[in-house]
Amino acid sequence: MTDRYAVIGNPIAHSKSPLIHGEFARETGQDMVYRRILGDEGGFAADVRRFFADGGQGMNVTVPFKEQAWELADELSPGAERAGAVNTVILLPGGRLRGDNTDGVGLVRDLAENNGFDFGGKRLLLLGAGGASRGVLRPLLETGLATLVIGNRTASRALDLAAATAAHRVSGCGLDDLAGRRFDLIINATSAGLDGGVPAIPDDCLAPGGWIYDMLYGDAPTPFMRWGHEYGAGRALDGLGMLVEQAAESFFLWRGVRPSTAPVIALLQGKRVSS
Ligand code: ATR
């Protein structure tokens, strides 16, 4: 029987996950379908239960339900436990639901493996202190980076998030406090770009030739990528590769097979160029 998977979020119509998982399934010969579910804020738990009661095998969870999925899961992977958010739900034998989080792995793989970024000894700035930042924090800390500063518009949230890691290489501050500091990689995990904005960071906080990574993506360079180009970034990347890599990790958790990501990234980039 064809196995059923889905992504739930709101909005969801724009989601590229069905295309990505469809390509993975085709390449690896897996008999599965993957669809979108438009969730609603009050009915998330009921939607998830219905999907699995109707024979669903696994789910991706996206904005704004990742925290609710964390609450709902019967058990959590260590990564999801620490992230406080779940983007992948796995049906276990007996019907229990396991929550995992593949966002951080996706980010690190896209930077290190797809783009050759060497984290060793590097100074990182992670912008934002919401769910998106929390979700990627631990995998970043396992990379061998030298220091990680969490910079946020509301300084207290950055301080709290940094303190929660209990890692001496991590600190938190407000955006103004970044004056005079230099970073080798700046990752944007804020939602500022959704309104066309860029976090108000000092113009000179990217080290010469440093990299920019925007976890958002779009058909055109994001506002933060444009900021990077203006201020001397060696590379400015958007979150398309992360999207495909986190999907590949989810696929692996469900199916036990690792799909190739490069052709799917190329396919999505091609669609962007031609759209
Ligand atoms: P998510 O789960 O997507 O991270 P969130 O928890 O609402 O969403 O967090 C959004 C993040 O983007 C926060 O760090 C927010 O900063 P505040 O904590 O000060 O609200 C940040 N953010 C949103 N709009 C921003 C803007 N225009 N400039 C800078 N930071 C912004």
Image: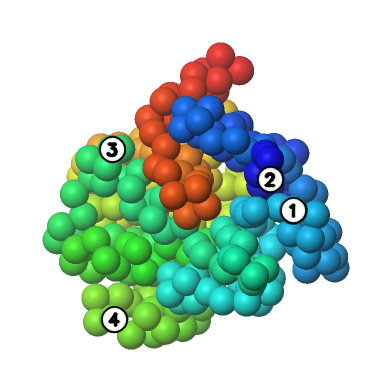
Disc 2 element = strand
Q: Position of residue 141 (x, y in %)?
A: 29, 68
**Does mark 2's beta carbon lie closer than 8 Å to ligand 1?**
no
Which residue, given by chain and number where applicable, does mark 3 sit on?
115
Work out whether mark 4 precedes mark 3 in sequence or the reverse, and give the earlier one.
3
Disc 4 element = loop
Label 3 and label 2: CA atoms lie apart by: 32 Å
Q: Are marks 3 and 1 in contact (CB under 8 Å)?
A: no
Q: Amino acid at mark 1?
A: Gly
Q: Are marks 1 and 4 in contact (CB under 8 Å)?
A: no
Q: Amino acid at mark 3?
A: Asn
Q: Amino acid at mark 2?
A: Arg
Q: Which mark is residue 167?
A: 4
Work out whether mark 3 precedes mark 1 in sequence or the reverse, and give the earlier one.
1
Coloured how? Answer: rainbow
Q: Amino acid at mark 4?
A: Ala
